[in-house]
Amino acid sequence: MSIAAPAPLFHTPFEAMASRCEVKLNAPTAAAAQRYADLAIAEVKRIEHAYSRYRPDSVVSRINAAAGGKSAVLCDAETVSLLDYAGSLFAMSDGLFDITSGVLRQAWNFKQAKVPSPSRLKPLLDLVGWARVERDGARIRLPQAGMELDFGGFGKEYAADRAAAVLMDVGVTQGYVNLGGDMRVIGPQPDGSPWAVGIQDPRRAGQVIATIPVSSGALATSGDYERFFEHKGRRYCHILNPHTGYPVAHWQSVSVLAPLSITAGSCTTIAMLKAADGAAFLAQTGLMYLTIDAHGQFGQPPA
């Protein structure tokens, strides 16, 4: 009796969602691998097209353009599902994960070390509030002109999950989808060993501070090092508290391992937003995690 050799792994890099992305997968031939990768990439591009706030023809842009009007926007089933998910995140985060808070970015330019004044933030904070969003079945209405939805808090992770699902549907059993650092692992390496996924050192660019073995599921990291500036000895990062309009400051980095990328990513963001209460939140999820606080101290689930 002979044992068939495992199918080789093929690597396909691509650009999407303003990120460097890649697909690594097993396939019987290079031609098959390219077909599979093209399917996954097409799914990522479809989601980007549908939910990017930068595209005037996206679902999100249609909803935002109608803000303050009398008519609600009719959404497809996929969008309704994502809106339901956004509502659940708002509830479990005590209102901190709010997809209407994207308007706050108008006050922050992380290429310039300038902290906006409370008077600059006040009119934008008045536009934030998921609880004010009107929903009736598949219809949604933003009641005030200037309000916006932004799916950026989980859109990339959702795309990673969808791309992985497409690959599994065509028989891929090993490899991963990596969308700008959001990892969805389909299966282990050909020899059965897990993938060693490095965690970025939040204070030393290009350096790995920890390595986490992953055979399946998803690993996501949020941190204060992705987009930031420093002013008068304080770091201001791109993760903004929707209640204050100012950046979070308690954690340098939060990484979560979960069955789905959208779950992992959402939990890292909520933990960042919850500041000191983030550790208790992560413990309640029952998921594996690694935190690094503002003093560089590591945190993990109790043994």
Image (cartoon, grey):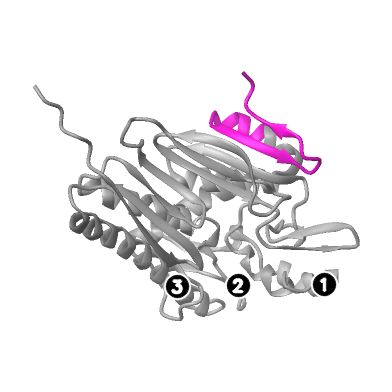
* Above or below, 199 relative to 126: above
x 51%, y 68%: residue? 18
The local secondary structure at tag 1 comes to: loop
Can residue 18 be seen from the camera position used here? yes
Discs 3, 2 touching: Cβ within 8 Å:
no
Q: What span is colored magenta in the figure?
A: 280-303
Label 2: few (<14), some (14–19) or many (≥20) C-alpha neighbours in 10 Å:
many
Please provide percent x and percent y for residue 193: 39, 30
Mark 2: secondary structure: loop
Q: Quadrant of the C terminus?
A: top right
Q: Is residue 81 left or right of residue 143?
A: left
Residue 197 belongs to magenta span = no
Circle nearer the N terminus (3, 2): 3
What residue sits right under mark 2 in the picture?
147
Most extreme residue toward the left is 1
Sequence-first disc among 2 and 1: 1
Q: Amino acid at mark 1?
A: Lys
Please provide percent x and percent y for residue 160.
Answer: 41, 53
Closer to the camera in the image, 140 or 51: 51
